[in-house]
Amino acid sequence: MTVKVYVPRDSGALALGAEQVAGALRTEAKTRGLDVEIVRNGSRGLYWLEPMVEVETAQGRIAYGPVAPGDIPALLDAGMLEGRTHALALGKPEELPFLVRQTRLTFARCGIVDPVSIEDYERHGGLRGLRNALEKSPAAIIEEVMESGLRGRGGAGFPTGIKWKTVHDAQGPRKYIVCNADEGDSGTFADRMIMEGDPFVLIEGMAIAGIATGATKGYIYLRSEYPHAAAVLNEAIAVARAAGVLGKSVLSSAFAFDMEVRVGAGAYVCGEETALLDSLEGKRGQVRAKPPLPAHQGLFGKPTVINNVISLASVPIILDKGGAYYRDFGMGRSRGTIPIQIAGNVKHGGLFEAAFGMTLGEIVDEIGGGTATGRPVRAVQVGGPLGAYFPRSLFDTPFDYEAFAAKDGLIGHAGIVVFDDTVDMLKQARFAMEFCAVESCGKCTPCRIGSTRGMEVLDRLKAGIAPETQIETVTDLCNTMKFGSLCALGGFTPYPVMSALTHFPEDFRPVPAREAAE
Amino acid sequence: MQHARTENASTVQSIVERWREEEGPLLPILNGIQQELGYVPRESVPVIAEALNLSRAEVYGVVSFYHDYREKPAGRHVLKVCRAEACQSVGGDAVAERLEQLLGIRFHETSADGAVTLEPVYCLGLCACAPSAMLDGEVIGRIDDEKAVDIARRARA
Ligand SMILES: Cc1cc2nc3c(=O)[nH]c(=O)nc-3n(C[C@H](O)[C@H](O)[C@H](O)COP(=O)(O)O)c2cc1C
Ligand code: SF4
Ligand code: FES
């Protein structure tokens, strides 16, 4: 009998040697005459255990990890194909504490299914949302999304239902659904994981968006740093087309919807929605002044829904189980679940989908298990390069849009980067300025010039030249950037800078003083 | 040289033809050229401009805007090393310096023998397996000294 063995094709797993593991398994199975079928799944998101290999046995799936290619002979000797024990055996993956504590709605299938098998997708609940949507009127679909309370997961947290309604109400023969897959924030990889691990859920979400708003064409704008995601998406789109999910008649309905992947060219600012649209049109990725909103005049001037990957991938479960089901998770005005990405210097890094409301401390200390180096956690940056650095004293902040804003921070795309006590917060503040200078689209002076000035001022501070003056200057600069920038690149760079300065003032004083204080 | 030029020209021409009737063709064209040739030759700019009915300045403006596009040929290998925060948190800066030292070049440079071009990248989405890099499209995570030495060896080959 053929034994199914899962070896992820997720980039994170590949970066840790999954391809070599799959190769070793293939070779060894052949040598031993074993009947093995290797399925290349996505990742379940437990990156300290990747490459995590799973075997389908009579008792269910049994996981082993982290597996190195050289472990394969010993694993086979130990009876891995029958799910027997070994030093690397992890038991049933769904019983691993990191997964048990999660609420996987958007990521329900990620790491479980073959990402390019539509049969697998349907067997695990896929396409139910789209089928339900086809039974409803566009207005009723939008009503369901409104009720769910879903807010954009790209960072700004704008209600998805309202955006869709605006496009639905806009007049025009041609409308677009654009998926923002630019995922530029350091510390984030949820979009990548879903695109590589369960691309059909994104395709389904986009098709539902098209049906709800009257758009027949979708684009996924994918960053060029994600070649593996591009390959899986293109494969999945072709499969979806062949299966009649995409095309002139979506699942044999009167609705047409098709899509394609467009790859960017390395510009962080192209994640900003209007810069992204310009880039898709073939221009420099410069931010447009709003209004007009993309919902009114978006891609090629046509009404356009632009949503983040996770926003769109959360729609199928909402249409499957109902808006109320999704809304009942979460807290305050942050409804449903959020795929938190735990990254950086952390013991248990990976993807943790949970209802809003866990505290930052729970996520970093309990779920993440503290630092990988074993040293104390000193700072965590939440929400990417434009997000604030949080000290331990703010670890009681619940994961919720408003709670983070109240602490002068932001959730952004929900990436958390952990730093131990060797971090130099002055260096981190300088990097924030440098990143802004490198990535500025150049339209506004405070962003373009202010960030370069900020680097110089922080360099002088580092050199111990008139520290109080430099701190005053950088504070002023941050104010100018905050209020004089057209978009959040210039406008939010002050978050990491000022949070570092506010919460870690000791790193901004000249070295002799610091030494004297110790 | 002349031969290479003609070859480049026909590559550019066929990529332009593939995309010219599509919506928003410029980035796919430039991506295609960069992928095939490793850079976007100056001579391709007027060809693209004419096909898409744009000015040369417009096309050049786009080429110069995006970090990915090179105006000079790349080395046989391209090594992109992540310089962003999650990688910094686990010693990414030291890894980057070590790679510069091992390759004998700085970021944005190509080695004199044309073996490798070293480029910074701001996040590869491998932030839970940091520090990370990409060598000719192959992703590499948790880079320690041993892995850095191996990467440099392969990049110099
Ligand atoms: C500089 C900058 C970069 C951004 N990068 C991204 C990104 O990579 N992915 C994303 O989904 N949104 C990004 N955004 C947010 C988008 O502008 C926009 O809010 C989002 O695509 C809307 O989708 P949503 O409502 O589903 O979140 C960025 C914004 C700014 C200002
Ligand atoms: S803030 Fe910076 S990136 Fe944003 S529009 Fe202005 S110059 Fe461009
Ligand atoms: S920060 Fe280096 S991979 Fe994300």
Image (cartoon, coloured by chain):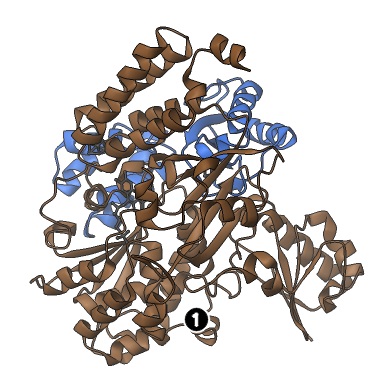
Residue sitting farthest toward the top: A465
Residue A455 image point, x, y percent: 38, 21
Q: Nearer the viewer, residue A252 or A104?
A: A104
Q: Which residue is mark 1?
A: A118
A278 vs A379, left or right, is left
Identify the colour of chain A in the image: brown
Q: Is residue B136 visible?
A: no
Where ligand 2 lies, by quadrant?
top left
Q: Which chain is blue?
A: B
- Label 1 environment density (alpha carbons within 10 Å; few <14, some 14–19, many ≥20): many
Q: Quadrant of residue B104?
A: top right
Q: Quadrant of residue A518?
A: top right
Residue A11 image point, x, y percent: 57, 55
Q: Nearer the viewer, residue A285 or A337?
A: A337
Q: Residue at x 58, y 55 (%)?
A: A362
Amino acid of disc 1? Ile
Residue A225 image point, x, y percent: 46, 47
Q: Residue at x 36, y 30 (%)?
A: A438
B50 vs A489, left or right, is left
